[in-house]
Amino acid sequence: MLFTSLDEEIIERGELQMGFPSLFQFICVICRRIGLISTANPDSQNMKHFTLVFAVVLGLATSMQAQRLTDIHAFAQVPSALSDDEAQMMRGTEHESALEVAQRGGGTILFYEDFANGLDGNNIYGAWSSEDTGADSIWQYVDMAGNGYFADGSASGVQPPAGEFSTNIDPLNSTSVDNGWMIFDCDYFNSPISEGYENTEGWITTPMLDFTDNGSVVVTWEQYFRYCCYPYAPVYLEVSNDAGVSWVTFDAHGSFIESANSASANALTTSVDISCVAANSAEVQIRWSYLQAPETGDAYSHYYWGIDDVTVSSNPVANDLSMVQLTNGDVYNVFEYRVTPLEQAIPEADGGLLAGVLYRNSGSDNQDETMITVEVLDDAGTVLSTTTEDIGTVYSFANALNCPANAQDTAYIATGWTPTATGNYVLQATIASANADEAGQDNVISKVIVYSDDEYGHDDEETLGVEFRPGDSDIEGLFNPCGYGNFYHMHNEGSVAYGITVRFGQSSGGGDLEFESRLYTLDGAVGLVDSPFESAYWNYDDDWTPNSPAVSEYVYLPFEDPIELSDADFYFAAVISEFESEAELTVLGNANSDTDNSTGDYNLTGGGDFVWFTSQTSTPAIRLIMSERVGVDEIANLNGIELHQNVPNPTNGSTTIRFELLQSRNVAVEIRDLQGRLIDLMEQGQLPAGMHQMEYNVAQLGGGIYTYTLVADGIRLTKKMVVR
């Protein structure tokens, strides 16, 4: 069993936006995923991610012109007209208020502030204080009419947020927005950028609070934010229990997955348990701090942070273990997939299916003798595998061995299970301790995973709720270059990539659109942009759109030649349009889903270059295909021949090979190994039109991947089969 500490980074992401990459950013992002914080295999998988780190870094170095870290400071413009998805994100939807969250389960309210009186306070304890590096002209109080006021009471003359990069952003959609709210509007402070800018920091601090009689202290508030230019959110919660002499720092980005230049939900209700500092303390102060991230040193000068409805409560629940997330893979060291080709299933000898169980102690007491049980079920509900791990004591926030305490931890559990057939499976995890759980409804979590004949995919075809689109070009009537893709790795040797499938969105604008399908190979020699790749050129077809009656599924785009895949490299499968065009290249995807940093977006930097941004928030529906599927369809249409997948596959005995002929043909079937050597030849003679099948016994074959080829009057169709 492997353990890794995770923050709330991998629960939920905001919408896909443009950012600005740097050498340091990508080194830090990926290094957080490898052995620096994980005890996963330090030899194989971590070396793969070191390869990926330097490949991506080298590819970006040219576009950044080797600038120093402190010199890299460009901004991606907020679009003048938001898409429907972005507008919905900015407006926000119905959310639980801070008070509702704090009172859940009978929580006791210890402090509440709605900023109806600005920094003077609308509570029984007294006034707030504020400080910022802009001579106290960054923090603003926004009254019920939307007017902004600085800490000294002077009017700013604007309706925040009011900077040049955030002028189309709505007010904070908090519960008590009509009473007013607070905002750190560093974008307004640094506008116009043409006159220069400076990195900013600021704090607003509660009056002194007494929690002597409280063994649990939780802070909940409503917020929204956006920032540039690195993936680490510059928003923090700091807590002092010695009247402000020393401070302990907690992340304040809540369930938002950090991603440069992305916006959080509007509003995002966030809770932080500060018991390890504040419980049973008499001189507690809490401050909301906008800070230059320690990973970058500086570079957070623009955008905004809105705060309202600050609530401090005491957790009434003593025993409450919670499941947060379940993954079928190691999201730090490799990737996870919703759809995996059977030939890339992890063998039992390598531990089988790996379950990543993200959990937390949401109660106020330690949870002793904690056990996690992982099950694999088929789609009929039959349990195929059960694995139980003892993870010992899970400490409460107040008793955490380290402060600030991690919001949750992850147990990686090797199940030893390997699928024997394609289909849907359910991965399920249950957590329990010796203590009787008082809120047992969140102790079980499950997800559906798929093992396929030839598809490798991160996306979920059932929830394609967002659309990746290019931005408008500076040339009227044209769209910018764009591209979307996903990373892949091979656990097992011997696979061959034949192409990709893409679930296109609804293109607009009309006119021709030329684009390429590509497979980049990251071997550590060069970066992503300049990596060796195989590509094929295409003209966008309106029939590929989801509203077309002709095609409403994934579109198959073959590579010009099959590509042998290694387990030593990383691969990036993508579509890309490198030039301005009259029509959009659009792809459907899953929102808030990229928990393993496996996606990429070809987009515009503030410096005017187009580069691959490889740490995004949503997942495009682009899959890697490992059989000659497209060739099969084309030949079937032209020649009336179709070859089906052998059943069962994998097999260790007899397997059935089926094929269909629309006219009489002279037929033979070849069995070859992956080196192309002929293992067996079965002459079938002249066969009539219709469906045919033949039984083949693989007992004489060793375990591995083989191909079987239907040869019909010189026309060859090939598929792969796995022998166990």
Image (cartoon, grey):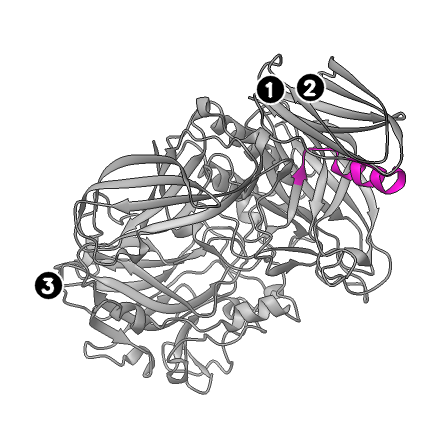
Q: Position of residue 110 (x, y in %)?
A: 19, 71
Side of 499 where 214 appears, left or right = left
Q: Magenta span has 367? A: no
Q: Which residues are magenta?
A: 624-642
Q: Position of residue 200 (x, y in %)?
A: 45, 60
Kindly identify the amino acid type of the residue bearing the numbered disc 2.
Leu
Q: For numbered disc 3, what is the local secondary structure?
A: loop
Badge 1 crowding class, 10 Å Cα cut-off, few under 14, some 14 to 19, many 20 or more, is: some
First in sequence, mark 3 or 2: give its number. 3
Q: Residue furthest left?
A: 213
Vertical placement of residue 261 versus 128, above or below = above
Which residue appears at 35% of the width and 73% of the height? 97
Residue linked to disc 1: 704
First in sequence, mark 1 or 2: give its number. 2
Number of labelled discs? 3
Residue linked to disc 3: 212
Picture quarter with the C terminus:
top right
Which residue appears at 46% of the width and 56% of the height? 12
Kindly identify the amino acid type of the residue bearing the numbered disc 3.
Thr
Residue linked to disc 2: 674
Q: Magenta span has 640? A: yes
Q: Position of residue 612 (x, y in %)?
A: 65, 45
Vertical placement of residue 311 versus 32, above or below = below
540 or 398: which is nearer to us? Answer: 540
Picture quarter with the N terminus:
top left
Side of 526 where 389 appears, left or right = left
Q: CA distance from mark 3 to mark 2?
A: 71 Å
Q: Position of residue 206 (x, y in %)?
A: 26, 69
Q: Nearer the viewer, mark 3 or mark 1?
A: 1
Kindly identify the amino acid type of the residue bearing the numbered disc 1.
Gly
